[in-house]
Image: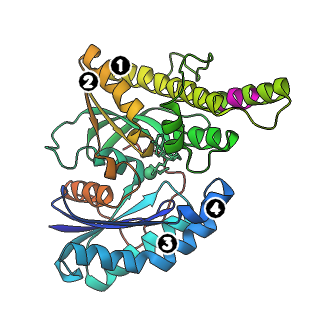
Amino acid sequence: MLTLGIETSCDETAVSVVHNGSKILSNAVTSSVHLHKKFGGIIPEIASRHHLEYISYVASDALKESNADLDDIGLVSVTYGPGLIGALLVGVCFAKSISLAKGLPLVGVNHLQAHLYAALMPRDKKIFPYVGLVVSGGHTVLCFAERADRFTLIGQTMDDAAGEAFDKVAKILHLGYPGGPIIEKRASFGNPRYMRLSAFNNSSFDFSFSGIKTAVLYHVQGLLNKTKKDKITEKQINDICACFQKAVVDVLVNKAVAACKFKKTRRLVIGGGVSINKFLRNSFLEIAKQENIEVYFSQAQLCLDNAAMVAGLGYAQYKRGRRSGFNLTPVSDLGIEVN
Ligand code: KG4
Ligand code: ZN
């Protein structure tokens, strides 16, 4: 069966055609990120308008690339939360229209669960149960996945998400938006032992990344006061990036491994935009070897927001009996959706 996946929860407008939940026939995406750069973060109204303008073109591209037309589609799957409410509304309305016009079943899926599903897509999916870690711009969540449609929350951030912390630290260092890729690059030239920096780390499974962002801000202000200059040096920027990245990754690794022990599983699935980070991947692979844990990441092109993961998860949940009606409503703060 071909599933049409639709994703509009943030700044990416994405449509994909996926065969039987795993074979990606097309994965079309356009982003409004260039329009948000000058503001240093996403402006919801700009994102929604961009989705509205582009979604039909992206859908046509996805169908063309997959050599399919709407008559070949058997299921429509759409992200209905969490995300920006106006942005989600565009995707959900578009999905409902196609479902109604073509008489197709509709499934609304959770964006965070879809990020985890992305790691399972090209593989044999029989890896349940597993501990899932979603690290994105809007969320940091640890959960336990028993099946494609059964998730339990283990822990989450109490303030900023990991990706949000990358974006805010990049703003403090005047590195532009989004912060993740540039911080990763600058960190590769920096000294991770330049300063003592750590993110909130206790025995709970919850995270907090707002303190580390403030520590970076105070450190930069201290350097500027000391030198009476209006800029810190390029070397200092690289060193701060290396220390910040290491501190964030260290706490993610510690808590994810502890969650695997707590849930007595050796499988760890990691998804979301931050999981594209190579330092993060290498750190997890290293600890996984020591702790005898199998760690699964998605392919790089499935880490950031895309509709292939939405189509894949929608199909898996449809097979387990999930259906949505035309009363499907976007939910901005959906969380991991315990069920
Ligand atoms: O999952 P995603 O595409 O969108 C959300 O659902 O939020 O994640 C976007 C986040 C941004 O905060 C961005 O800075 C971060 O992923 N990101 C990275 C990297 N590339 C993107 N963070 C760390 N290292 C990267 N290379
Ligand atoms: Zn995302």
Rounded to the nearest whole Å, what is the CA distance between mark 3 and mark 4? 13 Å
Q: Is residue 151 visible?
A: yes
- Closer to the camera in the image, 229 or 103: 229
- The disc label shown at residue 43, or none: 4
- Closer to the camera in the image, 271 or 206: 271
Q: Image quadrant for the C terminus?
A: top left
Q: Is residue 135 above or below residue 240?
A: below
Question: Which residue appears at 59% of the width and 22% of the height?
Answer: 200
> In the rendered structure, which amino acid carries the disc numbered 1?
Phe
**Total numbered circles:** 4
Say which residue label 2 marks: 265
Is tag 4's residue or tag 2's residue first in the polypeptide sequence?
4
The percent position of residue 81, horizontal first and vertical second, equals 46, 57
The percent position of residue 273, horizontal first and vertical second, equals 43, 46
Say which residue label 3 marks: 51
Q: Is residue 132 above or below residue 298?
A: above
Q: Image quadrant for the N terminus?
A: bottom left
> In the rendered structure, which amino acid carries the disc numbered 2?
Thr
Is tag 1's residue or tag 4's residue first in the polypeptide sequence?
4
User: Tags 1 and 4 in contact by the CB under 8 Å rule?
Assistant: no
Circle 2 or circle 3, nearest the eye: 3
Is tag 1's residue or tag 3's residue first in the polypeptide sequence?
3
Rounded to the nearest whole Å, what is the CA distance between mark 2 and mark 1? 8 Å
